[in-house]
Image (cartoon, rainbow, N blue to C red):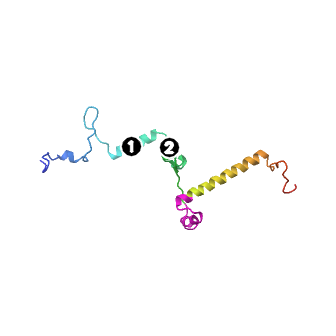
Amino acid sequence: MGKKTGEALPGPSALRESPGTPRKTNERGRVRKTRTTAAAARLGERRAAARPARPPAAAAGPRQANTGTVTWQARIDAGFARELVEADAPVLGLDSASALVREGLRLVHKQARELAMAKEYDEYYGGEPAPLPEGVAAAWDD
């Protein structure tokens, strides 16, 4: 008997299982045998071979959060990072590495939009300058 509770002490078979872990039984109520590590590894290999391959994390794109934002990561040189935080961030009024990254991505996006617009302009006008509005004199003669 236990000293304080009056319950029987567990026997040797109970000591083999983790406390609080229920024994797994099959549909007939018999205790199921647990797999060895090697058997579990073989089963995992068979299951992995049966399912379609997942794309690498980089190909899958950025991780999405439930808040409508995404998280991107990049490795940069430590000296460049220090220069950005210590010299550039104060000049731009940015208070964190995240703010620096967001501002940098905004600038990249702006530049990409400008280049796309210039390409569309060139395609539309066939490489020629756009015609001037009526009443506007050319700044130079051709």
Residue 54: mark = 2
Q: Residue at x 56, y 60 (%)?
A: 100
Disc 1 target residue: 42
Secondary element type, mark 1: helix
Q: Nearer the viewer, residue 34 or 95?
A: 95
Q: In this rendering, does residue 80 appear at all?
A: no
Q: What SS does tag 2 mark?
A: loop
Q: Inspect the magenta stretch and tell me whether residue 109 lies in it.
A: no
Image location of residue 19, percent across then percent down: 24, 47
Over which residues does the magenta segment extend? 76-100
Q: Nearer the viewer, residue 81 or 49?
A: 81
Answer with left or right where residue 141 lies relative to residue 46.
right
Which label is found at residue 139?
none
Q: Nearer the viewer, mark 1 or mark 2?
A: 2
Which of these two is toward me, 108 or 59?
108
Q: Position of residue 20 (x, y in %)?
A: 25, 45
Residue type at mark 2: give it: Arg
Q: CA distance from mark 1 to mark 2?
A: 20 Å
